[in-house]
């Protein structure tokens, strides 16, 4: 990445991905500011916004080098009417606001990276989805309820690409699940299942899991900042999606367990999802996504395969929590 000191704004930067990026760029000497509804103590400044209207925060975008918009309500919930509305609006409205702020800048940022999701592609068991893959929502082998996630993803990207910001390069980050050892993240939750003997395959176990190690997530963002010819959607994921049953087996082995792992049939997952207030789609949908544009541009993944990534993440998880290794 360029050694020039960058001024980076991260709307919605108090979540897991925002913390990963803010921490990295701050540690490497860049000027980082986060924009959030609920500021948290941090080593970098945080500006307050409502996520629904312009305010003083918008002035901070003028003169910034890069804006990385990650705003959006967590999807780790049941998709009732209220949550559906919040999930959709928190993405489309905040994206529109960032676009308005950029359009009003005397010195607009040269790059706007906006969160999207690898879930935008269809439920796929037959072939991988690069950026030219089929958008989901009408596939016959997927429950109709899954169309909501596709509707959100497409509306999110429409809000992004319809913004009137001709002087700013735009990239939609179709990001798969980002694995980091941070508390409360996806990897922390999955490892908790393994530690308590519940880390078996879900349903058939043949649904694909697309993922990316946090190191490669950071490096991909840096790569996109430096690549001035990159615009449009980019898949941010490992080049090696993996079946759910193999994914969980590698995680169990990384934790050094010998048990098989209790399988979770689809009907039991549905019951558990009600109790946990989550959607079964999050683990039943096959996300067979590959980073076509990154690979074609020569991006080199440090953790392309899940086995090596899981071993690294387990070691780091234990180091942070001072867990014994045996």
Image (spheres, rainbow, N blue to C red):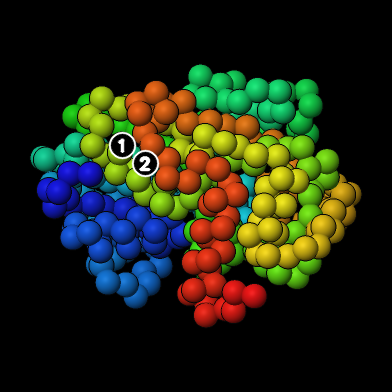
Quadrant of the frame with the N terminus: top left
Residue at horizontal 55 percent and vertical 43 percent from the top: 305
Residue 191 left/right relative to 229:
right
Tell me if residue 176 comes above or below residue 77 in the rendering: above
Residue at horizontal 22 percent and vertical 59 percent from the top: 28
**For the residue labelled by badge 1, is the local secondary structure a helix, a strand or a loop?**
helix
**For the residue labelled by badge 2, is the local secondary structure a helix, a strand or a loop?**
helix
Q: Pinpoint residue 273: horizontal percent, then vertical percent.
A: 77, 56
Res. 292 in view: yes
Q: Residues within 10 Å of mark 1 (few under 14, many from 20)?
A: many
Corner quadrant of residue 49: bottom left
Q: Pinpoint residue 279: horizontal percent, then vertical percent.
A: 72, 50
Residue at horizontal 62 percent and vertical 47 percent from the top: 84
Res. 92 in view: no
Q: Pinpoint residue 168: horizontal percent, then vertical percent.
A: 22, 32
Quadrant of the frame with the C terminus: bottom right
Residue 143 left/right relative to 322:
right
Tell me if residue 309 comes above or below residue 277 in the rendering: above
Q: Which mark is residue 220?
A: 2
Q: Residues within 10 Å of mark 2 (few under 14, many from 20)?
A: many
147, 268: nearer the viewer: 268
Residue at horizontal 13 percent and vertical 52 percent from the top: 5
Q: Which mark is residue 224?
A: 1
Q: Are marks 2 and 1 in contact (CB under 8 Å)?
A: yes
For the residues labelled 2 and 1, the Cα–Cα distance comes to 6 Å
310, 33: nearer the viewer: 310
Q: Pinpoint residue 105: horizontal percent, then vertical percent.
A: 16, 41
Tell me if residue 226 comes above or below residue 50 in the rendering: above
């Amino acid at each position: 990445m360029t050694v020039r000191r960058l001024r980076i704004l991260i709307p919605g930067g108090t979540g897991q991905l925002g913390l990963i990026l803010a921490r990295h760029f701050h540690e490497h000497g860049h000027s980082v500011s986060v924009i959030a509804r609920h500021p948290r103590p941090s080593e970098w400044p945080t500006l307050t916004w409502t996520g629904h209207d312009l305010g003083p925060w918008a002035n901070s975008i003028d003169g910034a080098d890069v804006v990385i918009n990650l705003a959006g309500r967590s999807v780790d919930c049941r998709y009732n009417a209220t949550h559906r509305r919040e999930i959709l609006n928190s993405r489309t409205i905040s994206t529109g606001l960032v676009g308005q702020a950029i359009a009003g800048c005397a010195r607009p940022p040269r790059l706007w990276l906006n969160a999207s999701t690898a879930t935008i592609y269809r439920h796929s068991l037959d072939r991988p989805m690069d950026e030219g893959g089929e958008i989901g929502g009408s596939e016959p082998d997927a429950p109709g309820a899954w169309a909501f996630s596709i509707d959100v993803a497409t509306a999110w990207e429409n809000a992004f690409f319809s913004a009137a910001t001709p002087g700013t390069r735009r990239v939609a980050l179709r990001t798969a699940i980002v694995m980091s050892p941070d508390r409360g993240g996806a990897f922390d939750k999955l490892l908790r299942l393994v530690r308590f003997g519940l880390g078996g395959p879900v349903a058939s176990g043949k649904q694909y899991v697309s993922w990316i190690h946090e190191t490669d997530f950071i490096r991909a963002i840096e790569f996109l900042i430096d690549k001035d010819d990159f615009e449009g959607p980019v898949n941010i994921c490992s080049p090696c999606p993996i079946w759910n049953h193999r994914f969980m087996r590698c995680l169990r082995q990384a934790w050094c367990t010998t048990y098989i792992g209790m399988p979770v049939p689809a009907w039991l997952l549905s019951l558990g999802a009600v109790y946990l207030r989550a959607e079964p789609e999050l683990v039943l949908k096959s996300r067979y996504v590959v980073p076509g544009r990154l690979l074609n541009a020569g991006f080199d993944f440090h953790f392309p395969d899940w086995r090596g990534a899981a071993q690294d993440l387990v070691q780091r998880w234990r180091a942070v929590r001072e867990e014994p290794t045996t």
